[in-house]
Image (cartoon, rainbow, N blue to C red):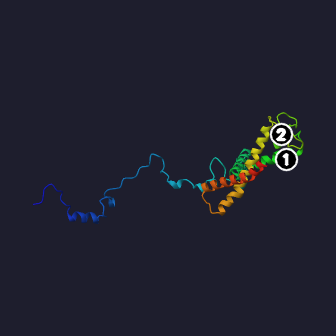
Amino acid sequence: MPPTHLEPFPDISTRDRLRDDGGSPRSKGKMPRARRRSSGLGADIRGDTGAPAVSTLSSMPTIESPPLTPRNSQSRVSRSTPKRRKARSLFRRWQDLSFRHTWVNPLILIAIILSAYFINPTPSNPLHSAIFLSYPLPPTDPLIAAHARYPGAPTHYGKGPRDFAFVAFYIIVLSFTREFLMQRLIRPMALHFGIRSRAKQSRFMEQVYTAMYFFVFGPYGLF
């Protein structure tokens, strides 16, 4: 005997009658469909196709501004690139060049100082103390040792504030020499010998430059 708490299956004749009526009790006007009311937003919510693509924004005319034409587009470009932006772009180019070729700025300073000196290459030129030593001592000066006081002895020099210009100029000269040799001579040597790592290249350049420095200036200092 089947349990009494189960719901009985609908009669086959009832399902056939519903199918003959159109497959749904709402068909043929028996159960009219409720009409959709308008949204409270006033219009349907637009999807992602309601806005133009980014690549077409410049060619889309708007209400506030007239459509772009070749004449007013050129005027906009000219107004959007003032002198300040041009100066900033030049500064960025110079900055990139300085980081890529670190020997350029010392070379420019050396060229400016030498050009200004050769306008008047005499001791009266203020830049003379930057290129040559100042404060020469006479042969009878007591600061000179007795064994160095003889005819034809090399000139001895004292110390003074002009020596700061001399030291500063040759710091620039040696900085240019170091950076130029490392980037234009030693780095190509490292690449030629198959050194690809940046860390190994830096170590190779430092060591080779140190060897070159002592090879040149060591005998010069002994002389």
Q: Relative to residue 184, is residue 60 drawn left or right?
A: left
Query: In the rendered image of this protein, does residue 71 appear above or below residue 135?
Result: below
Q: Which mark is residue 115?
A: 1
Q: Amino acid at mark 1?
A: Ser
Quarter of the N terminus within the rendering: bottom left
Residue plotted at (18% across, 59% down): 8
Q: Relative to residue 11, is residue 25 drawn left or right?
A: right
| Residue 103 in view in this figure | no
Structural crowding at the residue carrying mark 2, measured as other residues with C-alpha within 10 Å and reported as few (<14), some (14–19) or many (≥20): few
> In the rendered structure, which disc, 1 or 2, sits on the residue that comes first in sequence?
1
| Quadrant position of residue 198 | bottom right
State the image coordinates of residue 197 (x, y, percent, origin top left).
60, 58
State the image coordinates of residue 33 (x, y, percent, origin top left).
35, 55
Residue lying at the far front in this picture: please name it.
Answer: 147
Residue lying at the far top in this picture: please name it.
Answer: 142
Marks 1 and 2, Cα distance to the nearest angstrom?
A: 40 Å
State the image coordinates of residue 104 (x, y, percent, origin top left).
74, 51
Structural crowding at the residue carrying mark 1, measured as other residues with C-alpha within 10 Å and reported as few (<14), some (14–19) or many (≥20): few
Q: Which mark is residue 68?
A: none
Q: Amino acid at mark 2?
A: His
**Element carrying mark 1:** helix
Residue plotted at (22% across, 63% down): 14
Residue plotted at (84% across, 40% down): 148
Disc 2 target residue: 147
| Residue 184 in view in this figure | yes
Name the one closer to the observer, 119 or 23. Answer: 119
Name the one closer to the observer, 28 or 140. Answer: 140
